[in-house]
Structures are given as structure tokens and as C-alpha cells.
Image (cartoon, rainbow, N blue to C red):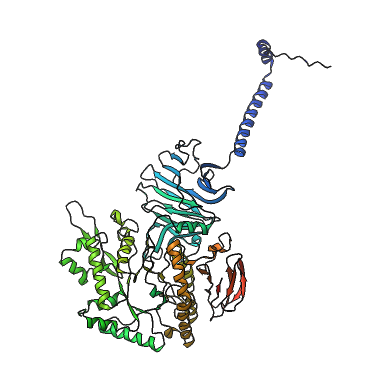
Amino acid sequence: RTMPLSRHTGQIPESNWTLGLREMTEPWKGAVGCLGVAVFFAMTIGIISWQALEQSPEEWVLRGRAGGMLWERRRGALVLRALPAGRPVVAIAVGSVPAAEPPPPRDHCWHDGGQFCYSWEEDAELRLSLEPPTAPGTECYGVRWTPLRPDVTLKDCFSMANVSWYGGPSIRAQRWPLNGAESPAQPFVSGDLGTNPNGFGPVLDRYFLGSTGVTVMVAPDVPLLLSLESHRHFCLETPAGRAEPLRYLLCVSANVAAAHRHMGNPPVGPARTRPDTALLGSPVWRYHGPEGSTAKIRRGLRSLVRRLKRHRLQEGVVALGERGTAILAAADHVPSERGKRQDLALVEPLQLSITLSPYASITSPLFLQSLHHGEAAGYWLSRQPRPGGTSIPLLTTWKGQLCARLNVTSEAALTWYLARARHVRQALGATYVFFEGVEGNSFLEQDVPPPAELAGDGYTRVLAAALATLGNGTVISAGARSSHLPLFVQMSPLRSDWSHAGLKGLIPSVLHYSLLGYNFFIPDAVGGSLSGDSTGDPELFVRWLQIVTFLPVMAFGSPPWLCCDSWVLNLTRQCIQRHQDFVVPLLLKYSEEWQSLGHPIFRPAWWLSPTDPTALTVEDEFLIGDEVLVAPITEKGQTWRDIFLPGEGHLWLDTNSAQVFDGGTILRNYSASLAEVPVFVK
């Protein structure tokens, strides 16, 4: 047996150690010192390397059951991931705090498992919280940034990398998804694209939907700026110097369609009501005749009706603009029974639509009358007076004239305005009333602080609610949190060309309006109403007509006999008939689904294929409900196109050829002559 060697475990004698050290030569002393430094550096590098390998670039800060929020150190971003696989849902770059400083390992709200809090010293405070789900199958996180100094601008940017985004604002040259849009940071307020083409359009919502199944909803009382940087990100920020918090709700669902279904049917909310569905089957003919006097307008209206009768188009609505309406309303006639019959006879057998706005020229009898009765201060928007001062109307420009705008915060002003609208409608025998100029914030446009109730889109929201009391034959020019009201919404004018500002922007606008709940819209006139490089082009008119056939209302500016030959005139009659016989019943059917569940009537391809990457970017097709797919031509001179048929496992019947195809496939180079529009029935 081998015995273990015995080892001396005592300390090294100090005398021996000291003696040996003294006997060392200087070179040896230097070598030992260098070795010590080398060991120190090696250990330091090892520790750093170990930390880099062991520590993840992301750190969980709040976890729920279906997902969780992480902090990504490298770029200073919040990341929402879905569990259990950790699928990335959205990345939010934080622009208001030092990006290099990660949250601490210690949570300021550690006592509450449903929250995470952290303060960046002297900059901002972040509070994340698990919120009650908006619907089964969703998980929601509240995000609240609070500035700790007045000069801090809060800014969160939502990445477009691997995420397609929908919702938010309408814009000139609408895109679907929003990823291709570009806009500088500006107030998130509805506007007139005619006067400000680089601003936001008349229909918007603080609701953004991501293709990964995420929704972003910004609190309605947050002063908000939005910027869009094409294919990079969109950013939410608060105005500088206001010290206002930025608050929004993030919710995650299984996919994009499930996310919107959940958001469309909240457990509480106002009941959705339909406008007058009789307008759905009635083509709208805009009057562009002489407007110099009452007599000229009457003759022009009669002439338009005679021509419509001659061309066998003697049904629908004749739409009179604001100037013509004002001239007829100001005419010296007594609204007697006989007078009413005469005005009604102007457009018989068609119906009449008139146009009003909340503006009054400062030289108009209407405004001067209000001054005479001492009502100007209450009836029109005014600047906030200084202590002891008097109110001065907030003057703005409308259609080239200096105007005052109706004060919708005054009950007396609204009562007076609505009574006047009813009187004009009755006196002229109008069935429908179109109110334009509903969009925009007059205070914001002039950099004047607004009253609290008119901040953001408060004006549009309050006026829309008031106009809805006039009945369900009312059309307005804008929408802001008003999609539940029984109102039609007039879409923005489009250019007479093939660009996204023209025909190509029509279907993205349809999908955008319907996604936000505005299913009862009136598209721009066939062929576009803004002059473009294809004005009067028969091919453009036909392709536009083929799309509008499948929308709620068919509107015409230039009648078909002015731009085109008899073949196009016959096609117009056929399209109107198809709209009435085939499309209107579908709209009525799916409007009931919208009322009960909040689902859009006009749906994107991803509604039936929410996980198919191809479906997420299809911007030139749309579904009516779940059963009809419309895939028109939007390229000049083209008689074929690729068509994506959504819904794997479904079968689609081509209504032109009676051929049947599988869903979840792409039809390459599918034929569509000028006389045809590809329409498939599931």
C-alpha cells in the first residue's frame, strides 16, 4: 500500500520569504511586477467576457401570462414578446431618456407584481402595468411616461422592421400598410388635405394595428404629435415645454385579425347605428353648372335632370355645393307649401342634397346679423379675452374668404345653427345635407391655446355628435371618435391620375376608413375631382367606375356622356344596376355584423389569411365581408394582374369565368380586359 505524502500546512516563515526577496535582482523584480499586471488584465478581460456572454442584451421588466416587456440595452428600447416562444411583437425605441442606461435590477414598484417603475434622474419616469384585457385572448400593458422637467420631449418610436402597421391617420396618397408613408412630426389632428396636403386627413384615430397581433391605443386626452418615417418607424411624442405625460395601451393577440376583432368589440362603448341606407343604392350626381344667381341655378339643375333622364339615369341624388345652397337659401322666397313643391320639382324624380359648413364670411348677412343682435361673442369661436377684456372672434380662412367659425361649446350657438340647418333643408326640399369643414382645429392652426373641450379633435367630435341629431340623412367631411354615429363620411378628393394621390390611393383609403369603423363613406367622384395628368381619360374613368361599383355610394362629378363614348355610358348603367342588385344587399348584411361585433365591412386580405406574409401588404384588393373578393386593375394600360386569393382551405369562384380556385394561392397574370373587373365569390 502506498502511503500519501505528508504535506506541511503551516505558513511560510516570514524570514525566509523576506530573505529571498532581498536576494532578488532588479530584473527579476520587474518580471514579477509585469506578470502581476498581466494577470490583473487577464482577469478583468475574463470578467467582462463572462458578463458579455452570460448577460442577455434583453432584461425582463414585466411579465404576464401571454407575453412580457423587456428592456433592450443596446438600443435603449422596450420590446414586447409573446410567450411561450418569445415571439417578438413590437420594439419601441425610447427617445426621451439616455439610451445607454439600462433599468436597474431593482424595480421601484417591486411590491406590486403587476407594475414596473423606474426614473431616469431629472429626465423622465417610466411606469409599465398589466391592465385588464379588453377581450378574451388578449393581454394588455399600460405604458406611462412622465417628464420630470418641462423641457423633456417624450418620444416613443415603433419599429416597422418585420411589422406592417395599419390605422392611425388618413393622408394624401394613402398607403396600405402605413409603412410606405412619410410625414414630419405634427399634431395628430384631422385636417383638410386640399389646403394642407402634407398634413393629416379628415379621418383618423389614436389606434394603430400591427401585423404581429399588437395594437397601440393612445389615451384621448394626451396632446399628441405623430411622425411617419417610411419603412423605419412611426413615432408618438408630446409637445415640448408642456410637461404632459405620454400614455398608451399595448395589447397583444394571436394574430392581426384576432387583434382587430378584439378591439372592434369592446365590452363597453356606445351603440353603433347606421345612417340612411336608402342612399346606398342611389348614385350621387354633383352639380357643376352655373351658380351666378337663383334663376341660373334652377335652370342648371333642371338641365342636369333632363340630361340624366335622356341617358336613362333618372334616379339617385343631385348634390348642390355650398355656394349654390347659400344662394338658394338667401333667395327672397317664403317657404310656403307651394314654394316647397316648386323646389322639390327642381330635381324630380331625383332627390336633392345640399351643402352647409360651420363657417360664415365676415361680410355675409349671417355673420352681420349675429353682430347686430350682439351674439357674435357666443356664436363664434373666440380668442380667450384678457381679464376685463372682451371676446374677439377667432377669424380663419375658408375657401379664400375671411370667416368666423361656429362655437360648438355654446349650447345656444348649436341650437341656433341646427335650427337654421333644418329650416334650409325643409325650405329647399332636400333629402340629404352634407356638412363640409368639420375637420381641423382652428386654435391650433393659429397657435392659440384652445379651450380644454376643443383640444385635439374636440371640435370635430362635438360637432359630429350635434349633426347626428339632424337625422340619418346627414353627411359630414371628417371623423374623430364618431364612427358609431348614424352619419355618412365624405372621402377626401383625389387626383385624376393613376398615382397613390389618385386611383391607386382609393382602395387603401377604403381599407383605412373601414378599419377605423367608418364603413358608410362616400368616395370621391368617379375619375377624381382634382385635376391631374389623366383628366378626361376614358380608361381611368372605367377602372375607377369598376372599383366604386363595390363601395357604399357611387358618386359622379363629370357625367359619363361628357368624358366618354356610348360604350362607357352603357357600362355606367350596368355598374349602377350591379351595385343595386349585388352590392347593396351585401352591405346591409355585413352592416349588421358591424353593429353587433364591430367588424369592418370592407376587409383586407389578411382578414382571412392573418399569418400569410403575402396578405399583409396587399393594397389593391378588398373583401366585402368574408364572401366577396374584388381585385380591380389600377395600372394604366394593363389587362392582367396577379391576384392573391386569401383563406387557405376556401374555394373561390370567378364570377366572370365560373372557374374555381383554391384560397391561399396567387393567380399569376390573371386576365382582366377593360370591360371586366375580377370578382370572386367564396
Q: Nearer the viewer, residue 29 or 7?
A: 7
Residue positioned most to the top? 15
Q: Is residue 375 above or below residue 22?
A: below
Q: Nearer the viewer, residue 471 or 539?
A: 471
**Can the viewer see residue 516 in this picture?**
no
Q: Is residue 271 above or below residue 104?
A: below
Which residue shows up at 17% across the image and 54% down it?
389
- How many marks do you count on the picture? 0
Which quadrant would the N terminus be assigned to in this image? Answer: top right
In the rendered structure, the answer to whether residue 544 lies left or right of residue 307 reads right
In the rendered structure, the answer to whether residue 547 lies left or right of residue 50 reads left
Q: Nearer the viewer, residue 17 or 143?
A: 143
Which quadrant would the C terminus be assigned to in this image? Answer: bottom right
Residue positioned most to the bottom? 310
Which residue shows up at 41% across the image and 87% down it?
312
- In the rendering, at what x and y percent does residue 575 appear? 47, 80
**Can the viewer see residue 228 in this picture?**
yes
Would you identify the image quadrant in which residue 162 lies? Answer: bottom right
- In the rendering, at what x and y percent does residue 297 appear? 29, 82
- In the rendering, at what x and y percent does residue 40 appear? 62, 28
Residue positioned most to the right? 1
Q: Is residue 148 above or below residue 215?
A: above
Would you identify the image quadrant in which residue 195 lies? Answer: bottom left
- In the rendering, at what x and y percent does residue 383 appear? 24, 57
Q: Is residue 230 above or below residue 93?
A: below
